[in-house]
Amino acid sequence: MPEQAAVDEERYIVEVIGELPYYVPMPQDATLAPNSIGAQPFQLYFQHFRPLRHPDDSQGEGVDDRIGTFIKSRVHICFRASVLPSEAEKDAYEEKALNLTNKALTSMRYAVLDHTITHVNKFQRTSIHVWEIAADGKAMPAGTFAEKTSYSPFGIGPQRTLTEAAVNRVWWIFNDLEPMNPAFLLILDARYHNAVHDIPRAILDVATALEINIDSLVNRYSLRDRTLSQIDLENKGIYELYDAVLLQAAGHSLHERPALFADLEYIREIRNSIVHEWKPEFHVSKGLRDRSKYLAQHQQRDGHVISTTHEVDGLIASGMEIIRFCVEAFKTKYSIR
């Protein structure tokens, strides 16, 4: 139950309780709250419990192996609200709670340099309760509008089977007869990190895929056309790679697809913000302002912070389309199908 609160215009408290897959080494009496002006008020704290287990289990008491832990934690996040929340708002509150929880986990991970404190993609169990603040300042139950269990993004899914063509391709790749494009592997990493709600790392994966894409294609196809080995790839900026270098190597520039080139610049600037500040925020930098042909589009999103996995899905899709544009350009020129 949340603490008693003074009566004001925010009559309701929305409490999100999320069960984590492991124990969080945070004292139960420690509370996190925002201190920036204008931030939405909230309180965040952790509680610990021993989940039920099979009596014949041999792992003993107090086990914390981060996988099948017998000490777990729940996070409680309390938000203030001026009106009674609706059923339709439950997902938004859960996502806000998950974002704040991951921010707290990242802060702990960094503060104590403990790599076992990791992002959580979903709460294993979630309950959302609403409390109404009475005239005497006490919080009274006003309802529970969400209780559910999550099996992680990959725990339960439809049964699938590879086609015969896919199995044949697996055989070629497994036997090192078809090289794997590292850019596509990084895109897969981006999808995974986004699924487990690690937004900065997912964007870094996409940005890295775009950084190595042109070099990888030039090096791969130089085995078929030795003239490609004469292309100077040293000290080339990423935008030069997708313009002059791509034009020289494959006869096309990404500027042929203005929306994709703008997306390339957008992803790159967000990547720079993450690298320097670990914050997925887009800014129109001086370099971008001096160089870009797409400032009108960029200025509309200057200062935007990527905060949802849905937005990252869009960045991943753009990254994949950029990579495929380049792959097809090389395939077309060098007649490989």
Image (spheres, helix red, strand yellow):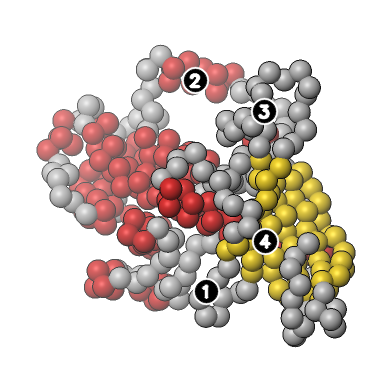
Q: Which mark is residue 35?
A: 1
Task: Note whether residue 6 is visible.
Answer: yes
Picture coordinates of residue 260, whole percent (x, y): 41, 58
Q: Amino acid at mark 2?
A: Val
Residue picked out by circle 3: 61
Q: Quadrant of residue 9?
A: bottom right
Closer to the chain start, of discs 1 and 4, is 1
Closer to the chain start, of discs 3 and 1, is 1
Q: Which mark is residue 289?
A: none
Picture coordinates of residue 276, whole percent (x, y): 32, 59
Q: Residue at x 66, y 23 (%)?
A: 60
How far apart marks 3 and 2 lie (CA) works out to 44 Å
Q: Secondary structure at mark 4?
A: strand
Closer to the chain start, of discs 1 and 2, is 1
How far apart marks 3 and 4 lie (CA) works out to 29 Å
Residue picked out by circle 2: 170
Q: Nearer the viewer, mark 1 or mark 2?
A: 1
Task: Note whether residue 316 is visible.
Answer: no
Q: Quadrant of residue 224?
A: top left
Q: Secondary structure at mark 3?
A: loop
| Name of the residue lying farthest toward the bottom | 9
Give the crowd class for mark 4: few <14, some 14-19, many >=20 residues within 10 Å: many
Q: Amino acid at mark 3?
A: Glu
